[in-house]
Amino acid sequence: MTYSRLFTLSLTAITLLLCGCSLQANEEEKAVPALIHQPTQAALNELQQVIAKLLGMKKITLASSAFTQESVLTLERAQHLDASGNMIMGRTTESPIQLELVLIKDSCVIRDQNGQVSEPLTLTQCHKQMP
């Protein structure tokens, strides 16, 4: 293989890589922080089901005000208590999980803070969070 052909192939690969990164950046820019528009019991149920699915859990419990004031939700595992109701020290070593509600086009989407895992909401209505 000649050097000019190798140079051309390298230049083409770099161009394609940069285009791919650019497209991914544009998609991320379209995600706007959002809040739940009208919280209902159906919306809360959907939130709990979708978040449990995202986290690989059977069930989670959320406050009815989740995502109504902030677009970011921090979740911690329930603390383990002894028979007297005192917290058992050293049982929870995990960091809290942060999820965010975003509006992408006209769809409400819950995703992890890194944007790697996401799930759309079908019943819940949301709107753009004002600064």
Image (cartoon, helix red, strand yellow):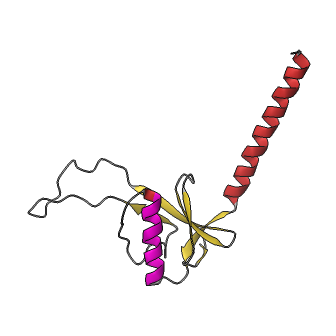
Q: Position of residue 126 (x, y in %)?
A: 58, 76
Q: Residue at the far left: name it.
A: 84
Q: Which residue: 38% across, 59% down?
A: 57
Residue toward you, 121 or 102:
121
Q: Which residue: 21% across, 58% down?
A: 80
13 sits to left or right of 45 = right
Position above or below: 95 against 46: above
Q: Position of residue 44 (x, y in %)?
A: 44, 77
Q: Position of residue 123 (x, y in %)?
A: 55, 78
Q: Which residue: 64% across, 66% down?
A: 32
Quadrant in which the C terminus is drawn: bottom right
Q: Which residue: 27% across, 51% down?
A: 92
Q: Which residues are magenta?
A: 41-54
Magenta stretch: helix, strand or loop mostly: helix
Q: Position of residue 30 (x, y in %)?
A: 70, 62
Please tell me whether residue 119 belongs to the stretch shown in magenta: no
Quadrant in which the N terminus is drawn: top right
All told, the count of numbered labels is 0
Q: Residue 6 appears in which quarter of the rendering?
A: top right
Please tell me whether residue 50 belongs to the stretch shown in magenta: yes
Position above or below: 98 against 46: above
Position above or below: 96 against 123: above
129 sits to left or right of 83 = right
Q: Residue 101 appears in which quarter of the rendering?
A: bottom right
Q: Residue 52 appears in which quarter of the rendering?
A: bottom left
46 sits to left or right of 103 = left
Position above or below: 96 against 73: above
Q: Residue at the far top: name it.
A: 2
